[in-house]
Image: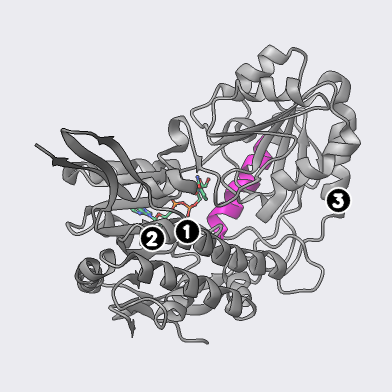
Amino acid sequence: MSHFTMTIAGEGVTAPGTFGVVNPATGAEHAEAPDCSREQLDEAMASAADAFPVWRSDEPARRAALLAAAEALFASAADLAPVLTAEQGKCLQDATMEIIGTGVWLKYFAELELPREVIQDDARAFVEVVRRPMGVVAAITPWNFPVLLAAWKLGPALLAGNTVVLKPSPYTPLTTLRLGELLRGVLPPGVLNVVSGGDRLGAWMTEHPVPRKISFTGSVPTGKKVAASAAPDLKRVTLELGGNDPAIVLEDADVAAVADRLFAGAFFNNGQTCSAIKRVYVPDALHDDLVEALAERARSARVGNGMDEGVQYGPIQNRPQFERVSELVADALAGGGRAAAGGRPIDGPGYFFEPTIVAGVDDGSRIVDEEQFGPALPVVRYSDLEDAVARANGTEFGLSGSVWGTDTDRAAEVAARLECGTAWVNTHVALAPHQPFGGFKWSGLGVENGPWGLHGFTELQVVHRAKS
Ligand code: NAD
């Protein structure tokens, strides 16, 4: 078994205990990760606090270090991708894309301007509005895109002059631990600390007195706990939470033209994407054709161990999630739904589930109302567009959504009525470093990416110089 260490104060650190990490393609433990003790978390926080004064004072050095970090990721993609596939399940090609994307995000932030605005310059005063770093940032990530989502936090946090303690999900700690090891030679000691452990380590981080900011990506229930835990200390929080993204297909859509992109928008990363399409609303006239077009794609999708050549979709990442997807699909079928494709777990070791298209379900069915976060997509028919929009919005979630049609102006008009952070037209999960990403309602608080994401890692300060 390979050896993985945490990074604290620039050093590789083992912990008093370890926990096993399962390869979801085999269902067997394949590695051990350090289980960070409370004392070690204190050390990580102290080292981040110690590194802060020097790090915050040298912007050119920060930019150079972030660029070097991006280059290190590009150069290590072939080494890191198999580690990611083995712990997360995604196919090697997607794992490689995630590592390269991590570098792309760091490079974007290395080059992003830190705003400084003069709002008054007259006989009486010179007044500037500037962005100051906050101090230590506690960053907590989920298991679906462990390294890319870490970069969404590290890039802006570090550029702004903060230092970071980063904790990956206990299901997928390994590539993030490797990231810490890789960046030991690139970032000054203490600037990035990487710790691993169970959920309680996340709770220790949010209640810890040192961090001034919690940047969290994960589920709605955990996000609420994070917000509550940060409140007594008035720590700043950014929460990127779950979604139940609707895709509304309009009557003028060309089914053959949109089916590939709809399928990709739902099944990217095996459906384990916060902003994946999680339910499709389709008008009566197009319903049967669309169900069949999506089912065809589901039937021909190549599912298997992500390390194997030609595999497009790996296993579901962990057993509880596999059981949840199985349960939601079984519930839909028991309630009168029809599996136009798939519908069952795949026999054998590992957490494999057939890519599934469920027809004949409606709002009120769990698979439509809840975030399934896996390879099972419900297609819901509608007769009245107003009703479809109301149902799309009739949820506590509000991460993103999309509208599909040939008349793109009309589709954009409908998209503008979706109550969500990103409204796409004829695409879905089109994310980029310069594009802010966040959720309405229970899907989040604050945004990541772009200058808006950078602002979330700063305090706004007014510098007012009197002239007379
Ligand atoms: P989760 O909420 O179970 O865990 C996320 C992280 O929080 C993990 O590192 C976990 O160890 C930690 N954690 C658990 N309890 C904690 C606590 N009390 N205090 C602090 N940290 C704690 O989520 P998950 O199952 O890993 O991820 C799936 C969820 O994440 C889905 O709902 C998905 O939609 C969401 N997600 C959202 C985005 C986004 O950008 N909006 C991106 C990816 C995933």
At a point 90% along the width and 31% down the height, the residue shown is 289
**Count the marks: how many?**
3
Q: Is residue 203 depicted above or below 464 in this figure?
A: below
Q: Earlier in the sequence, mark 2 or mark 3?
A: 2
Measured from the top left, where is residue 292 in percent x and y? 89, 37
Q: Earlier in the sequence, mark 2 or mark 1?
A: 1
**What residue span does the magenta drawing correspond to?**
318-331
- The residue pinned by badge 1 equals 109
Query: 349 and 16: which one is in front?
Result: 16
At a point 73% along the width and 60% down the height, the residue shown is 313
Under mark 2, the amino acid is Leu
Query: 92 and 99: which one is in front?
Result: 99
Q: Quadrant of the C terminus?
A: top left
Query: Is residue 146 something that shows in the picture?
Result: no
Q: Dot 3: few (<14), some (14–19), or many (≥20) neighbours within 10 Å? A: some
Q: Whole-Å distance between the Cαs marked 1 and 3?
A: 40 Å
- Ligand 1 has an atom within 8 Å of the beta carbon of the residue at disc 3: no
| Marker disc for residue 77 | none
- Ligand 1 has an atom within 8 Å of the beta carbon of the residue at disc 1: no
Which image quadrant is residue 166 in?
bottom left
- The residue pinned by badge 3 equals 299
Under mark 3, the amino acid is Arg
Q: What kind of element bears circle 2?
A: helix
- The residue pinned by badge 2 equals 159
Q: Is residue 190 depicted above or below 468 in this figure?
A: below
